């Protein structure tokens, strides 16, 4: 009997287009002899649109952007019966796969909805998603776990508005130039700026606050960018490390998704013992914020072999041939199709475990 798999994608986020690309890749990788695929497209305005069951691969993401006639409420989309390709009524989904990046999807909001509805889903839970999305909270937790990081400070918009001069001076006193300023709750390098002087710093604050009410400023460091994939629940496995070699000053959104002017080296060429350190630190980060399913852990490696954890991404991009996470696992011996199926299995495993919890005396 086929598993009924519901995919959530799009979303009210600056990473909306990235989510569509991930959805297309996942759909085309799924074995239709094993899965019935039910798509739910969330528009940039947050409207839910439930499309018909998919009968085959998708050639273009426009085929997934359903019109107003498919509009439903979130509750209707997730729980109501729907018509299959044979026009027979189907039961509820066996599992939900949120393919949402950024706020309103990767930050614990959708995960909270699914928890309240007691629906099994793929990926990280509410706590890990929220902590992983908020870079300030994440870094504070990593600090408590003893994971080395570059210096950082953060500000909320109201504090910056009240005394912008004090904010700039704190950055210059605590961080020094060059530094990077970014929205605390966003991914894919959206809203990030490299600052080498006061003028660029002021402009960076303005840019970052367009995307979030909280920003983080991090010390720039001359280092290689190394990433590790983590897969599992209580006993996660780590991929081989991979390296991002950007052709620009930093790996921004345009470099990732538009120009393609960056190189991924997998496995990364590393000094002896460093790969093991990176994998152990990835596991520590995964367990520190109570992750489940998947994570991509990002690091800086200096010429002196000093390692700093930069962040974890709790729903990394998963396009088959251009995203680091699936490529890391492909080079570790897990094909893209196997990876997607494994993530579904992990989601079901975690849901079954949660059903053992007693909620009454």
Image: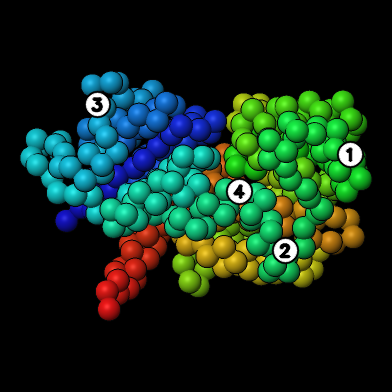
| Residue matched to label 4 | 134
Task: Name which residue lies at 32% across and 73% down.
Answer: 357
From the viewer's perspective, is the residue at label 1 or at label 4 nearer?
Answer: 1
Mark closer to the chain start, 2 or 3 = 3
| Residue matched to label 1 | 169
Q: Which mark is residue 143?
A: 2
- The answer to whether residue 137 is above or below residue 76 is below
> Seen from this angle, which residue lies furthest left?
88
| Residue matched to label 3 | 70
Task: Name which residue lies at 23% across and 50% down.
Answer: 93
Nearest the viewer among 348 and 269 is: 348
> Seen from this angle, which residue lies furthest front?
162
> Seen from this angle, which residue lies furthest top?
68
Task: State the CA–CA distance, disc 2 to disc 4.
Answer: 14 Å
Task: State the CA–CA distance, disc 2 to disc 3.
Answer: 46 Å
Q: Is mark 4 on a helix, strand or loop?
A: loop
Mark closer to the chain start, 2 or 4 = 4
The quarter of the rendered structure image containing the N terminus is bottom left
From the viewer's perspective, is 145 left or right of 305? left
Can residue 267 be seen in the rendering of this structure?
no
Task: Name which residue lies at 85% across and 33% down.
Answer: 165
From the viewer's perspective, is the residue at label 2 or at label 3 nearer?
Answer: 2
Q: Position of residue 121 (x, y in %)?
A: 35, 54
Task: State the CA–CA distance, disc 3 to disc 1.
Answer: 52 Å
The quarter of the rendered structure image containing the C terminus is bottom left
Q: Where is residue 236 in the image (x, y as percent from the top left)?
A: 52, 68
């Amino acid at each position: 009997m086929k598993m009924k798999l519901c995919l959530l994608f799009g979303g009210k986020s600056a990473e909306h287009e990235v989510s569509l690309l991930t959805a297309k890749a996942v759909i085309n990788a799924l074995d239709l002899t094993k899965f019935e695929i039910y798509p739910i497209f969330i528009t940039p305005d947050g409207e839910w649109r439930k499309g018909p069951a998919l009968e085959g691969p998708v050639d273009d993401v426009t085929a997934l952007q359903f019109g107003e006639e498919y509009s439903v409420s979130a509750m209707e989309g997730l729980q109501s019966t729907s018509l299959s390709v044979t026009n027979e009524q189907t039961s509820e989904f066996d599992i939900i796969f949120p393919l949402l990046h950024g706020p309103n999807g990767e930050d614990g909001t959708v995960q909270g909805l699914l928890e309240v509805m007691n629906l099994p889903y793929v990926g990280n839970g509410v706590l890990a998603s929220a902590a992983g999305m908020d870079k300030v909270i994440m870094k504070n937790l990593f600090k408590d776990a003893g994971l080395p990081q570059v210096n950082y400070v953060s500000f909320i918009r109201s504090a910056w508005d009240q005394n912008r001069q004090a904010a700039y001076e704190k950055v210059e006193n605590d961080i020094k130039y060059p530094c990077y300023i970014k929205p605390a709750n966003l991914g894919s390098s959206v809203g990030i700026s490299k600052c080498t002087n006061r003028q660029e710093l002021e402009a960076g604050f303005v840019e970052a606050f367009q995307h979030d009410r909280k920003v983080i400023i991090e010390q720039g460091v001359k280092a290689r960018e190394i990433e590790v994939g983590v897969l599992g629940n209580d006993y996660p496995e780590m991929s081989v490390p991979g390296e991002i070699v950007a052709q620009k000053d930093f790996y921004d959104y345009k470099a990732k998704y538009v120009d393609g002017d960056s190189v991924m080296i997998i496995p990364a060429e590393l000094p002896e013992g460093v790969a093991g350190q990176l994998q152990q630190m990835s596991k520590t980060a995964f367990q520190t914020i109570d992750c489940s399913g998947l994570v991509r852990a990002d690091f800086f490696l200096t010429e002196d072999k000093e390692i700093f954890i930069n962040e974890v991404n709790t729903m990394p991009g998963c396009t088959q041939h251009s995203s680091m996470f699936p490529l890391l696992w492909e080079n570790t011996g897990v094909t893209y199709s196997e990876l997607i199926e494994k993530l579904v299995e992990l989601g079901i495993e975690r849901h079954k475990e949660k059903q053992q919890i007693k909620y009454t005396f």
